[in-house]
């Protein structure tokens, strides 16, 4: 999972780098892939090499938060052997991103790159901290029930 999350984040940054080096086919494929997942509005996207990331700042936060959550899980597991983020905390983690969106829509406050990124980051890391323990427990059960070795 760590490998996939890292590659995902690398592709987000690779698109503008490849584009700046005139690798139009490669960057175009990455931008096209992510266009199915994100609106890619230039004004809402971080820039690198004078070109926008493959996703907006909120999606960048979600994906980088997921990556950090996957990285943090083994460290958390060392200190708390039965770590499992409760689903109620996931719903709590949705509050910042929901407020960021709805307060901006209402016109009370205009969200920023920073607010979009960090609310996405909170959501992404909470998704990872819900998903990874479940996958970990699944493989522990597989090992116990079928003699399947995970590592």
Image (tube, rainbow, N blue to C red):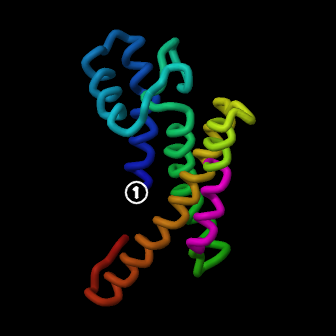
The magenta stretch spans which residues? 85-97
Q: Is residue 89 left or right of residue 28?
A: right
Q: Is residue 30 above or below residue 145?
A: above
Q: Is residue 147 above or below residue 24?
A: below
Taking the view exactly as shown, the residue that stands out farthest to the right is 108
Give coordinates of residue 126: x percent, y percent. 57, 59
Q: As rendered, which of 57 and 20 lies closer to the eye?
A: 57
Q: Is residue 11 above or below residue 91?
A: above
Query: Mark 1, residues whose alpha carbon is within 10 Å: few (<14), some, or many (≥20)?
Result: few
On the image, which quarter does residue 138 sit in? bottom left
Give coordinates of residue 40: x percent, y percent. 44, 27
Q: Is residue 6 above or below residue 31?
A: below
Q: Is residue 91 magenta?
A: yes
* Majority SS type along the magenta span: helix
Q: As rendered, which of 45 and 111 lies closer to the eye?
A: 111
The count of marks equals: 1
Of helix, strand and loop, which one carries label 1?
loop
On the image, which quarter does residue 102 sit in? top right
Give coordinates of residue 10: x percent, y percent. 43, 35
Mark 1 — residue? 1
Q: Is residue 11 left or right of residue 148?
A: right
Give coordinates of residue 100: x percent, y percent. 66, 43
Q: Is residue 50 magenta?
A: no
Residue drawn at (61%, 38%) of the image: 117
Residue drawn at (36%, 76%) of the image: 139
């Amino acid at each position: 999972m760590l490998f996939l999350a890292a590659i995902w984040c690398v592709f987000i940054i690779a698109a503008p780098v490849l584009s700046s080096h005139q690798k139009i086919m490669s960057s175009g494929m990455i931008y096209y892939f992510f266009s199915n997942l994100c609106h890619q509005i230039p004004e809402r996207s971080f820039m690198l090499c004078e070109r926008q990331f493959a996703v907006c700042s909120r999606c960048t936060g979600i994906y980088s938060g997921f990556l950090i959550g996957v990285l943090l899980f083994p460290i958390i597991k060392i200190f708390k052997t039965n770590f499992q983020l409760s689903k109620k905390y996931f719903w709590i983690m949705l509050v910042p991103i929901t407020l960021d969106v709805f307060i901006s829509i209402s016109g009370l406050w205009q969200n920023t790159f920073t607010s979009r990124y960090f609310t996405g980051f909170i959501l992404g890391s909470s998704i990872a901290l819900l998903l990874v323990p479940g996958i970990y427990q699944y493989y522990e059960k597989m090992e116990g029930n079928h003699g399947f070795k995970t590592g």
